[in-house]
Amino acid sequence: VSTQSTWGVRFFILLLYIREMSASTKTPVPESVAKKAQRDSALSAAKIKSAVEAKKTNRAFRQAICKRAKQYADEYAANQANLVRMKRQAKNNGNFYVDEEPKLAFAVRIRGINAIAPRTKKILQLLRLRQIHNGVFVKLNKATICMLRLVEPYITYGYPNLKTVRSLVYKRGYGKVNKQRIPITDNKVISSVLGQHGIQSTEDLVHEIYTVGPHFKQAANFLWPFKLSSPLGGYSQKGKHFVEGGDYGDRAEEINKLISRMA
C-alpha cells in the first residue's frame, strides 16, 4: 500500500511539472493563422472607426435637414400671412385682390387609349401620362398650357396647394434611381440623385416642387409618375368638361379635393 501511494504522489508531481512547463512555454502558432488574426483585428478597428464617423455625419445631416425644414415652414407661414394681409388691405380700400398666375399644375389621366389620335397620344407620352390614373407635376408656361389644352378630354388638372404636394410625395412618392422605381423611404434615396442640386431631403423636394424652384425639372423628372387609385365615390361624367358638371379639363383649386379622394 505504501508503494502505491508513493507512486501516486510521484505521478501527481509529474503532472504539476508538465502543466507548469506547458504554461511557461508558448505554443507555436502557424503563420497563416497569425496573419489572419492580425488582418481581422485591423478590419474590425477600421469598421468601428467608420461607424463612428458615419454616426457623426448622419447627426450633422439630420440637423441640417431639420434646420432647412424649419426655414421652409417659416417661409410658408410668412407667405400665407402676407397673402391674408394684402387681401384685407384691398378689401379695406374697396378693391379686389387678384392672385398671381399659378406656376404649378398637377395633371391626372382619367381616360384610356381607345380611339386616341396620334398627336394626343404623343403629348400624353411627353407628359409621362401613359396609364390611366397616372399623375405628374407640370410647370406652367405657354408650351405646357397648350399641351394640356390639346389633351383636355383625356386628363384633368388643376393647381395643387402645399398640403396636396406634401401628401403626394410622402404617401405616393417613388423616385427614379438607376432607371428603377424606388420608394422614397429614406432621405438618402433623394440625396443620392438630387444632392448635386442642393436637394437632400423630402422637405427639400417638396419645397422645390411647390415653389417651382430653379431645379424643378430635375426634381419632377426624379419623381416617378404617381400611380393613384380610382377616386372615392367614382367619377360623374368623363365625357363632359368640369365646368359642365363632368370630370375632364381644368378644375383649378378643386383638383385638391379630387387628389384627396385618389391618394
Image (spheres, rainbow, N blue to C red):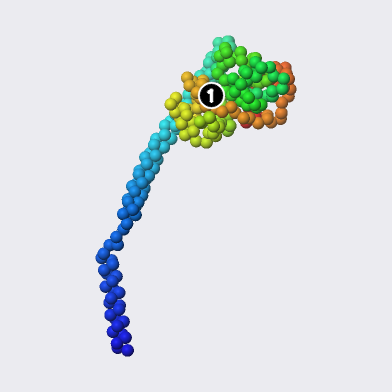
Q: Quadrant of the C terminus?
A: top right
Q: What's the residue at 26%, 68% (across, down)?
A: 21
Query: x and y percent of residue 12 in the render?
Result: 30, 77
Q: Nearer the viewer, residue 172 or 112?
A: 112
Q: Amino acid at mark 1?
A: Ala
Q: Which residue is mark 1?
A: 220
Left or right of residue 22, residue 141 in this image? right
SS of the residue under disc 1: helix
Query: x and y percent of residue 192 in the render?
Result: 46, 31
Q: Nearer the viewer, residue 174 or 260?
A: 174
Q: Nearer the viewer, residue 60 or 14?
A: 14
Q: Quadrant of the N terminus?
A: bottom left
Q: Is 147 drawn above or below residue 189 in the view shown?
A: above
Q: What's the residue at 44%, 25% (across, down)?
A: 197
Q: What's the residue at 65%, 19% (across, down)?
A: 121
Query: x and y percent of residue 30 in the render?
Result: 32, 57
Q: What's the residue at 57%, 23% (across, down)?
A: 137
Left or right of residue 46, residue 253 in this image? right
Instruction: Choose top left, top right, bottom left or bottom right for residue 238.
Output: top right
Can you see residue 186?
yes
Left or right of residue 176, residue 42 in this image? left
Query: x and y percent of residue 155 in the render?
Result: 66, 21
Can you see residue 77?
no
Instruction: Choose top left, top right, bottom left or bottom right for residue 139.
Output: top right
Q: Nearer the viewer, residue 25 or 219?
A: 25
How many residues crowd around disc 1 within 10 Å: few (fewer than 14), some, or many (20 or more)? some
Total residue callouts: 1
Left or right of residue 242, residue 140 in this image? left
